[in-house]
């Protein structure tokens, strides 16, 4: 495993460990993201910036500009309140050729297609490298609505105007989970899935989902 990839995985592991100490708290009682986890995610973004500054022609600023030119947070996605953090995982070999591309926490087919096309568009924009540590990238992208309150943290955040029915803040889904977790677990699970889609790095949501599924095994079917 490359050193850079190991650093990225370490940030996720450390975030997991720090959040385990808060497992006894409920989603509504705890902070959305602890300061330590928030700091780790910001440090992770610094690692990504350093890598892009080295590998991408024009640096991380050019990568972000190209992203906004080629990736459209389309009207249908905004109308349906498709909000969340999708993670681009890809490899660019040291000779500049593109390698494997994956999307973690996909939001919808349109955005998946946009991200894949953007990655392919970058094929002539990579500097060569001498060390395979700089071949692997894991870049979180947040798609959200202007003014909406969410604890998601991405390397790139794509804000756009709201269209149609107002989208809900994170607090709404936390309240929904608390309201329904005992009597209507299916609705509670739906609220947790929305929170996880918005912030897949927050283990509090994932732990609460595991607890809910263990308590109500029929939800797994």
Image (tube, helix red, strand yellow):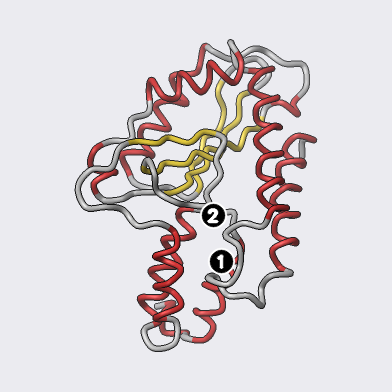
Side of 72 where 101 appears, left or right: right
Residue 199 in picture, x, y percent from top left: 52, 53
Callout 2: 10 Å neighbours few (<14), some, many (20+)?
many
Q: Could you tell which of marks 2 and 1 lies nearer the N-terminus?
A: 2
Q: From mark 2 to mark 1, how far is it between C-alphas?
A: 8 Å
Quarter of the image for the N terminus: give it: top right
Determine the residue positioned at 46% across, 78% down: 178
Residue 212 in picture, x, y percent from top left: 50, 79
Mark 2 sits on what residue? 200
Residue 85 in picture, x, y percent from top left: 48, 46
Mark 1 sits on what residue? 206
Secondary structure at badge 1 equals helix
- Above or below residue 197? Residue 184 is below
Determine the residue positioned at 39% across, 78% down: 221
Between 67 and 168, the one nearer to me in the picture? 168
- Marks 2 and 1 close (CB-CB < 8 Å): yes
- Above or below residue 174? Residue 37 is above
Q: Quadrant of residue 91?
A: top right
Side of 166 where 36 appears, left or right: right
Residue 20 in picture, x, y percent from top left: 71, 68
Determine the residue positioned at 53% across, 52% down: 151
């Amino acid at each position: 495993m490359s050193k850079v990839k190991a650093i990225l995985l370490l940030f996720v592991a450390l975030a997991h460990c720090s959040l385990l100490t808060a497992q006894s708290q409920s989603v509504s009682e705890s902070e959305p993201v602890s300061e330590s986890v928030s700091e780790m995610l910001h440090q992770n973004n610094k690692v990504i910036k350093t890598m892009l500054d080295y590998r991408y022609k024009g640096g991380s600023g050019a990568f972000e500009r190209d992203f906004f030119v080629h990736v459209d947070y389309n009207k249908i996605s905004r109308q349906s309140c498709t909000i969340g953090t999708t993670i681009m995982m890809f490899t660019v070999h040291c000779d500049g050729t593109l390698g494997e591309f994956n999307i973690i926490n996909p939001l919808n087919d349109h955005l998946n297609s946009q991200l894949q096309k953007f990655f392919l568009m970058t094929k002539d924009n990579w500097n060569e490298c001498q060390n395979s540590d700089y071949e692997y990238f894991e870049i979180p992208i947040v798609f959200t609505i202007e003014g909406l309150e969410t604890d998601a943290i991405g390397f790139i955040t794509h804000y756009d105007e709201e269209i149609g029915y107002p989208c809900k803040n994170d607090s709404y889904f936390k309240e929904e989970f608390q309201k329904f977790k005992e009597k209507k677990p299916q609705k509670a699970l739906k609220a947790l899935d929305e929170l996880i889609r918005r912030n897949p790095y927050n283990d509090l949501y994932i732990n609460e989902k595991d607890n809910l599924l263990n308590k109500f095994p029929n939800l797994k079917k």
